[in-house]
Amino acid sequence: MWLSASLRLCIYWGNPIPLEGANIMSMRLGKNIAIISAAALILAACSKEPEPAPTVAEPAAVVDDANSGNPNAVTTPQLTAEELDAQQWGGSSQNGVAIYAGTDRVFFDYDSSELSDSARSSLGKQAEWLMHYSRVRVSVEGHCDERGTREYNLALGARRAAAVKNYLIALGVPSSRLKTISYGKERPASVSAHSQNRRGVLVVS
């Protein structure tokens, strides 16, 4: 095919070419076409735009609902050290000892100043409270029911107050923070229930 085309080209221009020369010219033309084709492929490869690198999505930002203005956000109030202390210990007031220990008093049997097991358990909690609030001072009041003379009940109330104080001291509360006073039968807690009047009470000074 190339030979036929070469001969026609030579004849057309009026320059007959021998057959051997036609073969050489055909080979050169084929090489040129191959070179041109290779160059075209290289140019096409160079001109092709590179594929964009894959993008990595950034992690979504975490929004703090407490500061985002979201009306539905639930915020936990920050408690002060004093408020946290009051939650655990009840505070250093009269109510505090009753809240922490469950009571601010202990009760006695009739005509007795002996501490019962229940009284000792309550005093153990009261001692813990007093040790925590180391600056608190208390008075231990001794009380009696209305039976008996005034003088006898004053003496019995004093023994009851002393029994409470001594037990607290044995648990580690300094005696300098405790004082006792007896009211005998002068300050009944109940008009009808004698058992509620036979008591020893811690009163925060």
Image (tube, grey):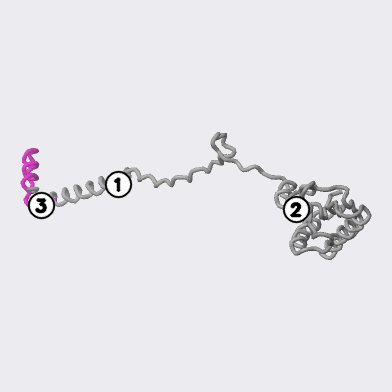
Instruction: Pick whichever of labels 1 and 3 is earlier in the sequence.
Output: 3
Which one is nearer the viewer's eye here, 78 or 129? 129
Q: Is residue 71 magenta?
A: no
Q: Amino acid at mark 1?
A: Ala
Number of the label disc, if any, that sits on residue 103: 2
Position in image of residue 195 (x %, y %): 78, 54
Would residue 165 be found to the left or right of residue 43 on screen? right
Question: Badge 3 local density, few (<14 within 10 Å), some, or many (20+)?
Answer: some
Which residues are the magenta region?
Answer: 3-24
Left or right: 100, with 49 as reference point: right
Tell me residue 184's x, y (percent): 89, 52
Neighbour tally class for label 1: few under 14, some 14-19, many 20 plus, Cα within 10 Å: few
Tell me how far mark 1 sits from mark 3, CA to CA: 33 Å
Between disc 2 and disc 3, whose residue precedes?
3
Can residue 140 be seen? no
* Residue appearing at x 19%, y 51% in the figure: 31
